[in-house]
Amino acid sequence: MTIKVGLTGSIGMGKSTTARLFAEEGCAVWDADAAVHRLYDKGGAAVAPIRDLFPKAVQNNAVSRAHLKQIIAEDPDALRRIEEIVHPLVARDRADFVADADADIVVLDIPLLFETGGDRDMDHTVCVSAPPEVQRRRVLSRPGMTEEQFAAILEKQTPDAEKRRRADFVVETDTLEHARKQVQDILAEIRKEDQDARDRS
C-alpha cells in the first residue's frame, strides 16, 4: 500500500528544495502548483470550463494567470467560482498520480495543505520551516516581489507556528545538508512504522 505524505510550508520556507530531497530518496513527488499549470495549459482540463465562465481569461487556448488575477481583483465572487472548477480537477490529478505511482511513499507537495483540510487524506504530514528573517530574505529576493505582496501572501497562509504544531514532522531548511538528513530520518521512521504495522497484522 502506498504511504501518502503531505508536504507543506509557507512561502520562502524551502518547500521546493525539500520536495526535491524526497525525490532523491526514491519518493514519488506530486506538485499541486505544477498540476494547476497543466490544467491551465493548452489542452488542459480547466481551459474549457474557465472559458465558459470568464471568456477573457483564456488567451491562445490556455488560461492566462494575469487575466485571472485581474478578474479576481474586479469580481469578489470570481475566486470562489474558479476554485469550484479547479479544486476537483486538481484532486483528480492527485488521485491519478497516487494510483499510478510505483514508489512505496508518495509525497504530495501542497502549499495550502492545512488551509484546505487536505491533511485529513494523508498518512503523515511534513512542514518545511525556516526562521522569519531567512524567509523574508528569500521571498524579497524574488524578481518583482514587494513587501506588500509578501504581507498579502502571508495573510492567506496559516502561520508557521501553527503549521509546525499540526504537522507530524518538521524540516528546518537552515542548510541543505541538515534538510537532507532530516528527510532521510523522517523516511526511515515512516518506513519502520509501516513495517512494524505489517508485522503486527
Image (spheres, grey):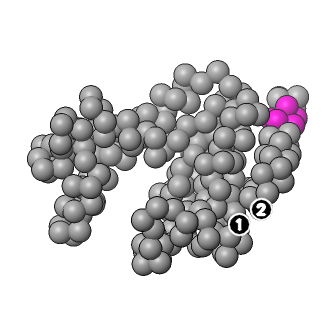
Helix or strand or loop: what does disc 2 sit on? loop
Tell me the chief SS of the magenta region. helix
Please say whether residue 16 is visible from this viewpoint.
yes
In the figure, 66 relative to 22: above or below?
below
Residue 17: image location, x then y, percent: 66, 48
Callout 2 touching callout 1 (CB < 8 Å): yes
Residue 124: image location, x then y, percent: 69, 47
The amino acid marked with disc number 1 is Ala
Q: Which quadrant, please, contains the N terminus?
A: top right
- Residue positioned 39% across, 43% down in the render: 36
Q: Nearer the viewer, residue 134 or 38?
A: 134
Helix or strand or loop: what does disc 1 sit on? loop
Sequence-first disc among 2 and 1: 1
Residue 167 covered by magenta stretch: no
Please say whether residue 166 is visible from this viewpoint.
no
Residue pointed to by mark 1: 130
Q: For this view, does 3 lie left or right of residue 195? A: left
Q: Which quadrant, please, contains the C terminus?
A: top right
Region in magenta: 191-196
